[in-house]
Amino acid sequence: MKKLAAGNWKMNGTAASLSEVAALVQAQPAPVCEMLLCPPATLVASMAATAKGTALHVGGQDCHAKASGAHTGDISAAMLRDAGASHVILGHSERRADHNETDAQVLAKAEAAIAAGLIAVVCIGETEAERDAGRTLDVVGTQLHGSVPAGATAANLVIAYEPVWAIGTGRTPTIPEIAEVHAFLRARLTARIGEQAAGVRLLYGGSVKPSNAAEIFAVPHVDGALVGGASLKASDFGAIVAALSAA
Ligand code: PEP
């Protein structure tokens, strides 16, 4: 399995930001791990053009479950593919919170993404209240079962475990806590999609930065990271890519 360093630019970046992409691919011309950046939809085509012929993959941050139609402001998986994307993030906690996305909707989007030839990066994770109540495994197990298509494979699915309270806060779970959730997710995924689960990349996400990446990447069943803030700068994301390549 090739590990994956994925960056989520969220609602950040304009054409000028593509200079960071040029710097990243110059610094990491042939990383051992896979490298993915998911810019806002406005930059998918131009980032894909910048990344053409390099080791960098480009993805979207969401797609509609339908292939086309009267859905003002939305974009389909096929449109992302057409713009040069190979992956799409689905069910990020910010979309679950801001747009009330349910597991069923994330599942429908993942099916659409896979049908269009994209790799679905499905996000799950507990809130701080849920962790404090001892419900973390229950919550992520339910999200996993509800958001992942039963027919998904190692080739078209990536899971990102992102505790909501760790996103953008500088806080992370302890190493044993990350280990517990990732081992649980591998087992749950096996129950959901069978033997293909062994090859699905399980990413950790939430305040990953150059200074903590190596110890997180040493955790069993952590096959990479989904990185928010630290993916905006080529120097930081490049250091995380280097740490994953060395893990
Ligand atoms: C994210 O939003 O997916 C994320 C992990 O953000 P950050 O790395 O900034 O915590």
Image: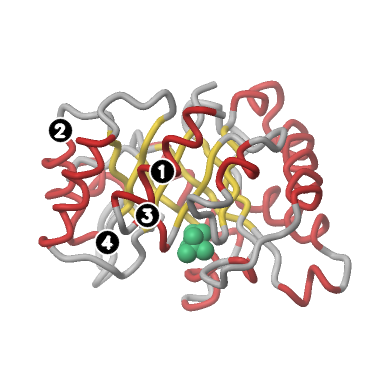
Q: Earlier in the sequence, mark 1 or mark 2?
A: 2
Q: Position of residue 20 (x, y in %)?
A: 21, 52
Which label sits on residue 239?
1
Is label 4 within 8 A of ligand 1 (CB to nearest ligand atom)? no
Scheme of colours in the image: secondary structure
Q: Nearer the viewer, residue 3 or 244?
A: 244
Image depth: mark 4 or mark 3 in front: 3
Please report contact status of discs 3 and 2: CB closer than 8 Å, yes or no. no
Q: Nearer the viewer, residue 19 or 76?
A: 19
Q: Earlier in the sequence, mark 3 or mark 2?
A: 2
Mark 3 surroundings: few (<14), some (14-19) or many (≥20) residues within 10 A: many
Q: Earlier in the sequence, mark 4 or mark 3?
A: 4
Image depth: mark 3 or mark 2 in front: 3
Total marks shown come to 4
Type of amino acid under label 4: Pro
Q: Residue drawn at (50%, 52%), measured in percent from left and top? A: 108
Q: Residue drawn at (59%, 58%), measured in percent from left and top? A: 104
Mark 4 surroundings: few (<14), some (14-19) or many (≥20) residues within 10 A: some
Q: Position of residue 94 (x, y in %)?
A: 50, 71
Type of amino acid under label 2: Lys
Q: Which residue sits furthest right? A: 134
Instruction: Provide the residue designation for mark 4.
Output: 40
Q: Nearer the viewer, residue 11 or 147?
A: 11
Q: Secondary structure at mark 4?
A: loop
Which label sits on residue 231?
3
Image check: 107 left or right of 14?
Answer: right
Q: Residue drawn at (55%, 27%), measured in percent from left and top? A: 154
Which label sits on residue 52?
2
Is label 2 within 8 A of ligand 1 (CB to nearest ligand atom)? no
